[in-house]
């Protein structure tokens, strides 16, 4: 088929790759001048399938309320409008145990599948994208340790190899961890990893272009028109028709689909990352860590360290919340005080997670024939991208999917 992929973030690039591998003729349209310039630009890089869980979880509403009053809150709320309030209402209704458990199950299935495909692509095409092995969850105090038994149980159930560590065992694996900051215990996941999402996207884009004949059209903002069957897409240079169109537009998806009468419960949930050059390798982390109290990750990405966190509901992509950014600096300073050069060339990034209120990502055909969606990967778009792309490419090609697609099908609100 002649297929258009809209959006060249990590989801669009992996989708184009899988479709082209299956012999389709693929054109990718992207508003920015390059790939992975939106939500995929500077994420934390964590690939930890056992930790891919729904945002709507029992107990989360209470936690979020408590966070609102703390200085280093992992969740922040800014200027709520009607769409945010509607989203929060839908999210609250999805925090039921049964909904959580079934969605968690679907997400784990996709996340482990995704990791396997990522590894296969990496090996086969010899891609190098600043990967580091192992992921450690740091538990500062009794409150976090109390949840450890539950977390280990959950990880085991999901099929993740996870080990409880004493502080000394944690220092053995990450010798640069600052012993002055109180560490009660840690959880270690040796099979998990951190890696540079944007770099992978750029390498795969180049492969798609050079080896698979995928055409990339950058600087092209697309609108969708349902004036004809099949659907037409409008670019700045005119209107085009494809046998199929796949929407991989992350946080812009709801806006793009609205003129077609399709409403989906998606909201941008903003977050921040800081990336800085490593000052002295001996003082830097070897791989990825998560401070469970502040929900801030610290990732080693090649010669840089990246600290990421905060979930801001409401507001927009402009402007920066200095309190959220100061939490990132605090966590880095607590655990790796001498790791990075923080007085030169520091990249501070604000990105948005395409977050559904009440469901896992949508991967499948919409109610308009020929219009397909691969979107709404929330906090885990990097970890879920390769599996989602394989799934949609199989569905579009009329092939049996390698994993069960239950939970991911299109649904309007
Ligand atoms: C702070 C932070 C940390 C994160 N950490 C992790 C992590 O550790 N692990 C993980 O798995 N995930 C993480 N995520 C989530 C992950 O980054 C996202 O889920 C993922 O990047 C979404 O990818 P995407 O391709 O769907 O969207 P995007 O990367 O945003 O791509 C969508 C693209 O579509 C383009 N587009 C939109 N509308 C149009 C249009 N009309 N015409 C043309 N082009 C259009 C946009 O310009 C954009 O390039 C994090 C996110 C944030 C914000």
Image (cartoon, rainbow, N blue to C red):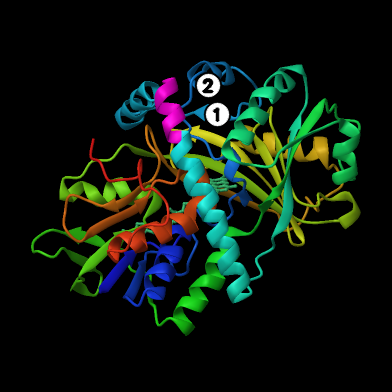
Magenta residues span 96-103
Look at the numbered disc 2 and give the secondary structure of its residue: helix
Q: Is residue 100 magenta?
A: yes
Image spot of residue 168 (x, y percent): 91, 34
* Mark 2 closeness class: few <14, some 14–19, many ≥20 residues within 10 Å: some
Q: Residue at x 81, y 35 (%)?
A: 334
Q: Quadrant of residue 239?
A: bottom left
Furthest residue to the left? 228
Look at the numbered disc 1 and give the secondary structure of its residue: strand
Classified by dominant secondary structure, the portion drawn in magenta counts as helix
Q: Quadrant of residue 218?
A: bottom left
Image spot of residue 360 (x, y percent): 40, 40
The reply to whether discs 1 and 2 touch (Cβ–Cβ < 8 Å) is yes
Q: Which residue is mark 1?
A: 75
Image quadrant containing the C terminus: top left
85 with respect to 262 (left or right): right
242 with respect to 19 (left or right): left
* Tag count: 2
Q: Which residue is mark 2?
A: 64
Image spot of residue 395 (x, y percent): 31, 59
Q: Quadrant of residue 6?
A: bottom left
From this view, report whether residue 294 is shown above or below residue 119: above
Image spot of residue 286 (x, y percent): 81, 52
Which of the two residues, 144 or 337, is positioned nearer the viewer here? Answer: 144
From this view, report whether residue 359 is shown above or below residue 48: above
Q: Residue at x 21, y 71 (%)?
A: 242
In primary-sequence order, the first of circles 1 and 2 is 2
Q: Is residue 187 magenta?
A: no
């Amino acid at each position: 088929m002649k297929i258009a992929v809209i959006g060249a973030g990590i989801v669009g690039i992996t989708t184009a790759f899988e479709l082209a591998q299956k012999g389709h003729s693929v054109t990718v349209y992207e508003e920015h001048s390059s790939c992975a310039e939106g939500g995929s630009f500077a994420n934390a890089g964590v690939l930890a399938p056992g930790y891919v869980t729904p945002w709507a979880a029992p107990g989360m509403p209470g936690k979020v309320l408590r966070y609102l009053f703390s200085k280093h809150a992992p969740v922040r709320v800014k200027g709520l409008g009607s769409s945010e309030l509607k989203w929060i209402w839908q999210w609250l209704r999805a925090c039921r145990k049964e909904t959580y458990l079934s969605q968690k199950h679907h997400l784990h299935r996709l996340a482990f599948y995704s990791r396997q495909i990522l590894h296969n692509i990496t090996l086969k095409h010899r891609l190098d994208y600043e990967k580091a092995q192992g992921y450690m969850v740091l538990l500062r105090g009794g409150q976090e340790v109390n949840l450890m038994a539950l977390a280990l149980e959950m990880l085991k159930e999901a099929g993740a190899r996870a080990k409880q560590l004493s502080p000394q065992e944690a220092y053995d694996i990450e010798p640069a961890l600052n012993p002055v900051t109180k560490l009660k215990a840690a959880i270690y996941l040796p099979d998990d990893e951190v890696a540079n999402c944007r770099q992978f996207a750029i390498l795969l884009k180049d492969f798609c272009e050079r080896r698979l004949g995928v055409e990339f059209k950058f600087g092209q903002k697309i609108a969708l028109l349902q004036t004809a069957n099949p659907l037409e897409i409008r670019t700045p240079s005119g209107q085009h028709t494809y046998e199929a169109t796949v929407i991989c537009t992350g946080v812009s998806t709801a806006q793009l689909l609205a003129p077609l009468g399709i409403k989906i419960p998606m909201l941008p949930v903003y977050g921040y990352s800081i990336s800085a050059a490593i000052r002295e390798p001996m003082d830097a982390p070897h791989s990825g860590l998560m401070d469970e109290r502040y929900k801030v990750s610290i990732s080693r990405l090649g010669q840089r360290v990246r600290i990421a966190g905060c979930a801001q509901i409401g507001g927009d992509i402009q402007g920066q919340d200095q309190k959220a950014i100061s939490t990132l600096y605090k966590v880095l300073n607590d655990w790796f005080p001498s790791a990075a050069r923080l007085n030169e060339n520091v990249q501070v990034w604000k990105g948005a997670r395409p977050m559904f209120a009440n469901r896992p990502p949508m991967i499948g055909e919409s109610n308009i024939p020929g219009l397909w969606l691969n979107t709404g990967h929330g906090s885990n778009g990097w970890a879920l991208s390769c599996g989602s792309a394989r799934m949609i490419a199989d569905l579009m090609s009329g092939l049996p999917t390698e994993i069960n697609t239950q939970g991911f099908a299109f649904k309007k609100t």
